[in-house]
Amino acid sequence: MMEIIKPMNTSIKMTIDEHKKILTLQEEFNAMFPFLKLEFFAKQLKPGESFEKKVAKPNIKTLHESRTVHNKKKVIITPEMTVFDLDKTFFTVYGLGVQVFRKSGKVWLETTLTDSWTLEEQNLQGEALSA
């Protein structure tokens, strides 16, 4: 079980367990950042590229089953991490593309134009836009 602490606490972090289901990882990410969501893709997206192939069956497949790169590295997500660094890390460690979406009212926006922002900044902006 992962304990979630409110953002603004720099000690908060999420260590990825490759044996968790992708859906569980998405739920834990959203619990850590309530105004963000994380989608997984079979390849890394380039700037301006559209989403092609999401990882199939995220409620059944684990990160281990979906990855295309196999090594012993771990991914640790912190509020200080930028969206760009998160994307780069998932691709380097697992061979998977990820996309962070920020809540804006009732819709989810891609964060591609603000990928230099930290996850904390993205979440705070999402909170402000959804109030």
Image (spheres, helix red, strand yellow):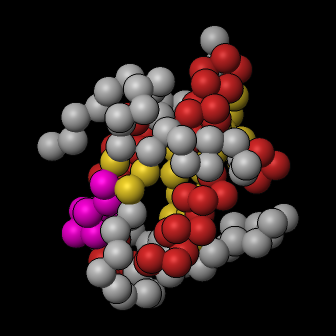
Asked if 126 appears above or below 60 in the picture, the reply is: above
What is the span of residues highlighted in magenta in the rendered image?
15-22
Q: Nearer the viewer, residue 117 or 59?
A: 117
What is the total number of numbered labels drawn onto the structure image? 0
Instruction: Answer whether residue 18 is magenta in the image.
Output: yes
Q: Residue at x 34, y 48 (%)?
A: 14
Q: Is residue 69 left or right of residue 74?
A: right
Quadrant location, the C terminus = top right
Q: Position of residue 81 (x, y in %)?
A: 55, 48
Instruction: Answer whether residue 90 is magenta in the image.
Output: no
Q: Residue at x 44, y 45 (%)?
A: 78
Q: Quadrant of residue 65?
A: bottom left
Looking at the image, which residue sits at the far left? 1
Q: Position of residue 31 (x, y in %)?
A: 37, 34
Q: Nearer the viewer, residue 121 or 112?
A: 121
Can residue 31 be seen here? The reply is yes
Magenta region's main secondary structure?
loop
Can residue 36 be seen here? The reply is no
Q: Residue at x 84, y 64 (%)?
A: 48
